[in-house]
Image (cartoon, grey):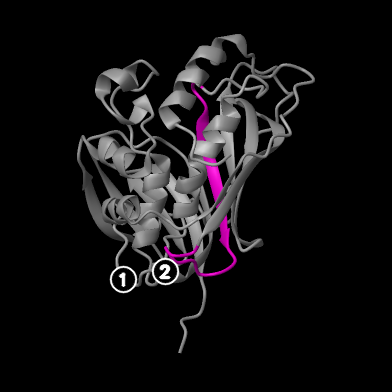
Amino acid sequence: MTRTPSLPLSLARGAATSPFKRAGRPGATLPSDRPRLPAVPVAPGPLAAYRRICGFTGPDALPVTYPHVLAFPLAMRLMTRRRFPLPVTGLVHTWIEITAHEVLHPSDPLELMVHAEELSPHRRGTEVTVVTEARRAGKLVWESRSGYLSRHATRTGTAPAAPAPPAGETASLPAVAEWRLPADLGRRYGAASGDRNPIHLYPLTARLFGFPRAIAHGMWTVARCLAEAPRPHLVHSVRADFRAPVLLPGTVTYASDGAAFQLRDGDRVHLTGTAAARPAER
């Protein structure tokens, strides 16, 4: 593949093929495709817009979440192919793990590749793990693993319960800031990231998929929290779990103890996560 796939085209293909797919089908297998994009430097305009909407400032390093944004069109192309067993319509991003093996910069030409790794039973349906890799001069410098859930009826007792969160994850972290999120946040982030999924854009398009209003992108919530880290350019390891959608407009509380973080609204937790940073260079 020589150019970035069109996200709108992938979404349209997903909408057309989803009615013919049945999640939870016995014997379902994942395609072995590993779509990739050749190494090119990051386009400065979209990156600047992304940094602004997510709140990244400071050193001119690539935000640790940005390779996921760059590779998302590849992931969507993979998940909307006919051979992919889950319908993309209604697919929910449930968690993400990111490991940056090196500090990346906008001038670094990154080769991107994605593949689907496993199908797992979930108490609410079937979950697929999608792996994204970024290489510089052939060396693996960044990688992520994401869980996407296709919700469907399951037989009682056949699907395992959701894993318990790590100790302390559900404890209330100290509040750091309160953020008022505008109604157009999804459209603004979509313009910066290219992810214009209808659930994030307008109340009407969100209601078509069962949401009362547009919801914030999960990856925006992660990036916005990481931008508040003491040294976001040095963050190299992230785990985030998406607990509940953030309705727009809305007000949320960002809470953190330095390593763990949360996004919540009263007693309702939308996002939990942990992040680790490299020691600052002397």
Identify the residue shown where x is 40% and y is 18%.
209
Q: Disc 1 residue type?
A: Gly
Q: Does the residue at mark 1 contact the one at mark 2 (Cβ under 8 Å)?
A: yes
In this rendering, would 224 be left or right of 80? left
**Amino acid type, label 2:** His
Q: Quadrant of residue 267?
A: top left
Quarter-of-image position of residue 215: top left
Q: Nearer the viewer, residue 143 or 1?
A: 1
Residue 75: x and y, percent? 56, 37
What is the quadrant of the C terminus in the image? Answer: bottom left
Q: Residues within 10 Å of mark 2 (few under 14, many from 20)?
A: many
Highlighted range, magenta: 89-108
- Which mark identifies residue 233? 2
Q: Residue at x 49, y 62 (%)?
A: 275
Mark 1 surroundings within 10 Å by alpha-carbon count, few (fewer than 14), some (14 through 19), many (20 or more):
few
Q: Residue at x 28, y 46 (%)?
A: 252
The residue that label 1 is drawn on is 58
SS class, disc 2: helix
Q: In the picture, residue 269 is in which quadrant?
A: top left
Q: Residue furthest bottom?
A: 282
